[in-house]
Image (cartoon, rainbow, N blue to C red):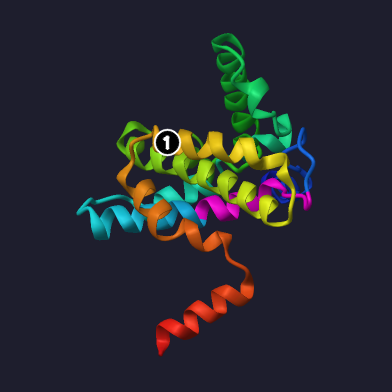
Amino acid sequence: MQNNFYAMLSRMKYIDRWALMRNSYTENISEHSLEVSILTHALCVIGNKRLGKNLNAEKAVLIALYHDASEIITGDMPTPIKYLNKDIKGAFKEIEAKANRKLLDMLPDDMRPDYEELFFPDKTLEYEMKLVKAADKLSALIKCIEEEKTGNTEFKSAGRTLEASIEEMWLEEAKIFMAEFLPSYHLTLDDLNRNQIDSEN
């Protein structure tokens, strides 16, 4: 029997983000999902190593990897529209859930449960889901920083909004990341290399 799940997932690279913004470079949801997965892992490691938590980093990373998979079907809905009011937000959540269910239905019956827990995580992973959300916002903030570095001021306001939004989540893992790791995203490649060499001497 033919199964289309992985072929559909491969189309994540065709869905561009930030459609309403003037971009100096495009970012697709495949690239974004990888970065969110990396950042989710970072936040979980910070939580476990620095804060003494027992977070399921591996499961959180997999959830992050698929967190925007529904956009293969729905497209990337601009944030100002998605969160315009409770009715639109609720309706879009329902559309996302139906899109995820459609993707899962493309899997063979014996494999589907392993993915279902990633597309629809249970409450035992509630805190990990918060970290995925924080990583999602951090990824968007990093995009804003990178755009501003090119001289594109289009993302300046979005960057400030995202930074405030992350701070309002009151997640210690995100605060630590922003304090220790986020400043490096403002550096050039030469600066990053120079800093590394300096730290080794």
Residue nearer the viewer, 34 or 63:
34
- For the point 72% across and 49% down, which residue is it? 27
Q: Residue at x 61, y 51 (%)?
A: 145
Q: x and y percent of residue 5 in the render?
A: 67, 45
Q: In the rendering, at what x and y percent does residue 18 appear?
A: 72, 38
Camera-side residue of 31 and 172 = 172
Q: Position of residue 86 (x, y in %)?
A: 54, 11
> Which residue appears farthest toward the top when viewing the image?
87
Q: Identify the residue under disc 1.
A: 121
Amino acid under disc 1: Pro
Kindly indicate the quadrant of the structure image that contains residue 87. top right
User: Most prominent secondary structure in the magenta stretch?
Assistant: helix
Residue 31 found in image quarter: bottom right
Judge the density around disc 1: few (<14), some (14-19), many (≥20) Cα neighbours within 10 Å. Answer: some
**Residue 12 visible within the image:** yes
Residue 6 is left or right of residue 133, and the answer is: right
Judge by depth and name the residue closer to the eye, 177 or 83: 177
Tell me if residue 30 comes above or below residue 19 in the rendering: below
Work out which residue is located at the far bottom of the displayed protein and give it.
201
Residue range (magenta): 24-37
